[in-house]
Image: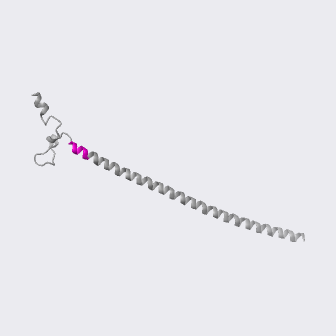
């Protein structure tokens, strides 16, 4: 009796007992004892493939983020250069206008003195 209980495939962890007699690929849910070692290995391999694909996507996104950051820094640098050159031009124009107005005033004063 005890030997029957320990060797009975229905009561043990024998995964082959859940196979249907109609077809090999079918499983009887009422007799399911778990996955076979090959099925478990296949699941782990699929999980590894999913993890690798996810890591590739993360790496790609990280590289895109780095490239975008570098691009933004270059654009900002170019904008600062343009703004600085505009500032220099406007400053020289302002000083030249103020110099012209000063010269006019000085000339008026000189003419008054004469």
In the image, 113 versus 54, the foreground residue is: 54
Residue 44: image x %, image y %? Answer: 28, 45
Residue in front for this viewpoint, 62 or 83: 62
Of all residues shown, which one is farthest toward the right?
Answer: 114
Q: 12 left or right of 82?
A: left
On the rendered image, what quadrant is the C terminus found in?
Answer: bottom right
- The structure residue drawn at horizontal position 80% and vertical position 70%, both measured from the top left corner, is 104
- Residue at 44 percent of width and 56 percent of height: 64
Q: Which residues are magenta?
A: 35-42
Q: Is residue 31 above or below residue 100?
A: above
- Asked if the stretch drawn in magenta spans residue 79, the answer is no
The quadrant of the image that shows the N terminus is top left
Relative horizontal placement of residue 112, taking residue 94 as reference (left or right):
right
- Residue 40 image position (x, y, % from top left): 24, 43
Q: In the rendered picture of this protein, how many numbered marks are placed on residues?
A: 0
What type of secondary structure mainly makes up the magenta span? helix
Specify the quadrant of the image occupied by residue 14.
Answer: top left
The spot of residue 108 in percent (x, y) is 84, 70
x then y, percent, for residue 54: 36, 50
Q: Most extreme residue toward the left, as rendered?
A: 1
């Amino acid at each position: 009796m005890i030997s029957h209980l320990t060797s009975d495939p229905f009561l043990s962890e024998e995964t082959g007992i859940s196979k249907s007699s109609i077809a090999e690929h079918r499983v009887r849910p009422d007799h399911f004892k778990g996955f076979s070692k090959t099925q478990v290995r296949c699941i782990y391999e699929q999980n590894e493939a999913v993890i690798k694909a996810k890591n590739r996507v993360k790496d790609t996104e990280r590289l895109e983020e780095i490239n975008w950051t570098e691009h933004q820094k270059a654009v900002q640098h170019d904008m600062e250069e343009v703004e600085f050159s505009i500032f220099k031009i406007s400053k020289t124009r302002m000083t030249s206008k103020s110099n012209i107005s000063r010269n006019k005033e000085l000339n008026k004063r000189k003419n008054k003195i004469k």
